[in-house]
Image (cartoon, rainbow, N blue to C red):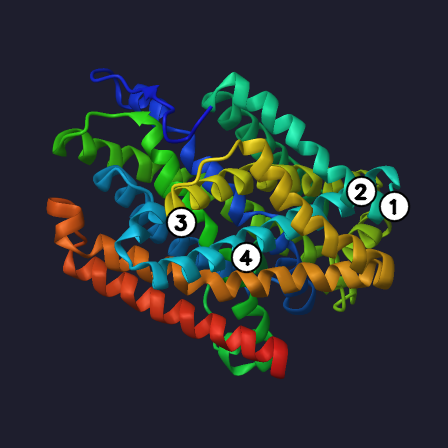
Amino acid sequence: MNISTAHIPVPETGSFFRKLLAFSGPGYLVAVGYMDPGNWATDLAGGAQFGYALLFVILLSNIIAMILQHLAAKLGIVTGKDLAQMHKEYPAYVRIPLWIAAEIMIIACDLAEVIGSAIALNLLFGIPMVIGIVVTALDVLLLLALQNKGFRWLEALVITLIATIFVSFGIEVFLAQPEVVALLGGFIPSASIVTNPAMLYIALGILGATVMPHNLFLHSAVVKTRGYTRDPKGQKEAIFFSTIDSTIALSFAFFVNAAILIVSASVFHFSGHTDVSDINDAHRLLAPLLGTSLASIVFAIALLASGQNSTLTGTMTGQIIMEGFLDIKIPAWMRRLATRLLAIVPAVLVSILFGAEGTGKLLVLSQVVLSIQLPFAVIPLVMFTSRRKHMGEFVNAPWLTAVTSLIAVFLVALNSWLIWSTFFS
């Protein structure tokens, strides 16, 4: 299976839902990156420290993500090129550094999945962290099996894992029994989000951890797997249904991130455990505070599904970036193994030297590295989709260019502040 050659038929006639079903899939591959283990720490900390107050920030993050993913899908559908391939317009002295930055991004992304999966294996089966980290290299065998089956099989597995995460946190929310009125109040913006420095830091962390650069590369590529008619009418239809697909999928991601914060607020904040800030603390306290071991088990299952889901889509993105920037095609299993080994080595060393606390800090560091890469994906995406020479009649409307430019400036400023705070504050 190759992303660039996969061709999934789209009916030229038929009902709305039949066409939507044909286009459904890429959005769920993208949504995985919005509920990966890297997001959990900020959501857990936000709920534990400030109750439901930061639910508005999660909602805002998701709206921004929906807009950017719409641009990514439109770029791939109209130009026939993904975001990585569009970088060939730049001279080599610009393109090569951008490619190196993108590769670092993939390794950082993979590092989060390695640590998340290893923590889940430890919580579920008591497997030591070091062994769990090494075991994660074996998921390359799963990828090989899926490649032989076809692209729809990969999408089906990803959707199944998303459903597992969704149901798991549905159970967690049910067990936590949150106060509905207070919960709904969390979606109303509060002045304290910007006036309270501690709350602002967590809020910016949630925003920075939610919008991930690798999803923009991935979405612009996987939308091309659909067999839509390559003319303005077919492209318009493809953009319409692909946007619906990604918006629905990101709604699931929104539920998961909101549910993590809601459970954290209900269980930890209102019981006085406001210092919960990492996955291990949350897992350890869920059972005694809710009075059932089911809560901890379901939490760990969701974490494992999240890690495995993200690792599959991360592999695809790495393949897209290498082929797009450099025109180098290598077997996906080789690409996967190389990336995973580069992630495993630091994770193993930190786990041996510093234990669970060290791997938790490494997980946070991986999110900082991803934040550094965000401008290198968002700014070119906005620029390319705002140029008529690339997009023709599908060029961004002036209002959309203005909105997305503001989003780009906001995200760059946000991530610059986060990086400064992380290293120098």
Query: Could you say whether the residue bearing mark 1 is in a helix, strand or loop?
Result: loop
Of marks 1 and 3, which one's residue comes earlier in the chain? Answer: 1
Q: Nearer the viewer, mark 4 or mark 3?
A: 4
Q: Residue at x 35, y 53 (%)?
A: 68
Task: Locate residue 111, reporting x and y percent.
Answer: 65, 52
Residue located at (42% from left, 37% from top): 27
**Can you tell which quarter of the image residue 170 is in?**
top right
Which callout, 2 or 4, points to the residue nearer the camera?
4
Residue position for label 3: 216
Circle 4 residue: 104
Contact, CB < 8 Å: mark 3 with mark 2? no
- Do the residues under discs 1 and 2 have CB atoms within 8 angstroms? yes
Q: CA distance from mark 1 to mark 2?
A: 6 Å
Task: Please rate how many residues cluster around mark 4, counting C-alpha atoms within 10 Å: few if below 14, some from 14 to 19, many from 20.
Answer: some
Dot 1 amino acid type: Pro
Mark earlier in primary sequence (3, 2): 2
Where disc 2 sits, the SS reads helix
